[in-house]
């Protein structure tokens, strides 16, 4: 879900109380298409947080959704050396606990028919 300004039509992420373009507070939650492009990424080989040691190495990516907003999230289901700036990605959801679900992105794989 992302916010959409009902006044000017802008998509908004991260969640805010006012639209950053027109300052309207007439924001509604809308479902994102969940697809976008990888703008940038970094591969983490070490971390200061022991909770993440089992996940190393992992990739953090900056994704521009088709709605025009940017989101930072893990990029999964891809070897780090396969990553390319501007590659198409789509959201997948990781149910970490019953209360916490994280959006992550994976490359869009084209089927070869």
Image (spheres, helix red, strand yellow):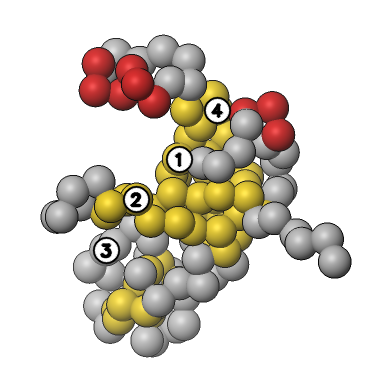
Label 2 secondary element: strand
Task: Name the residue at the right extreme.
Answer: 113
| Labels 1, 2: front one | 2
Please state which of residues 97 and 3 is positioned toward the viewer in this rendering.
97
Q: Which residue is mark 2?
A: 94
Q: Earlier in the sequence, mark 3 or mark 2?
A: 3
Q: Earlier in the sequence, mark 1 or mark 3?
A: 3
Residue at the extreme bottom: 7
Q: Secondary structure at mark 1?
A: strand
Residue at image position (14%, 55%) is 99
Q: Mark 4 sits on what residue?
A: 42
Task: Give the residue at x 48% y 15%.
Answer: 45
**Percent coordinates x, y for residue 109 in the rendering:** 70, 55
Residue corresponding to mark 1? 74
Q: Residues within 10 Å of mark 1 (few under 14, many from 20)?
A: many
| Quadrant that contains the C terminus | bottom right
Q: Quadrant of the N terminus?
A: bottom left
Q: Residues within 10 Å of mark 2 (few under 14, many from 20)?
A: few
Q: Position of residue 91 (x, y in %)?
A: 49, 58
Q: Residue at x 71, y 34 (%)?
A: 82
Query: Which circle, 1 or 3, is nearer the viewer?
Result: 1
Residue 55 in sight in this render = yes
Disc 4 packing (10 Å; few <14; some 14–19; many ≥20)? some
Please report whichever mark, 1 or 2, sits nearer to the chain's N-terminal start.
1
Is residue 44 among the parts visible in the rendering?
no
Q: Say which label, 4 or 1, has the lower sequence index.
A: 4
Disc 4, SS: strand
* Residue under label 3: 16
Residue for point 51% across, 41% down: 76
**Horizontal relation, residue 5 to residue 89: left or right:** left
């Amino acid at each position: 879900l992302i916010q959409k300004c009902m006044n000017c039509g802008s998509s908004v992420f991260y969640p805010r109380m006012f639209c950053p373009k027109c300052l309207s507070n007439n924001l509604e939650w809308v479902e994102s298409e969940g697809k976008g492009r990888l703008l940038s990424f970094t591969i983490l080989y070490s971390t200061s947080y022991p909770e993440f040691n089992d996940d190393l190495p992992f990739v953090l990516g900056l994704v521009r959704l088709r709605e025009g907003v940017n989101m930072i999230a893990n990029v999964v289901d891809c070897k780090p050396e396969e990553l390319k700036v501007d590659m198409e990605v789509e959201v997948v959801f990781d149910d970490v606990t019953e209360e916490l679900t994280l959006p992550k992105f994976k490359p869009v794989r084209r089927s070869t028919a």
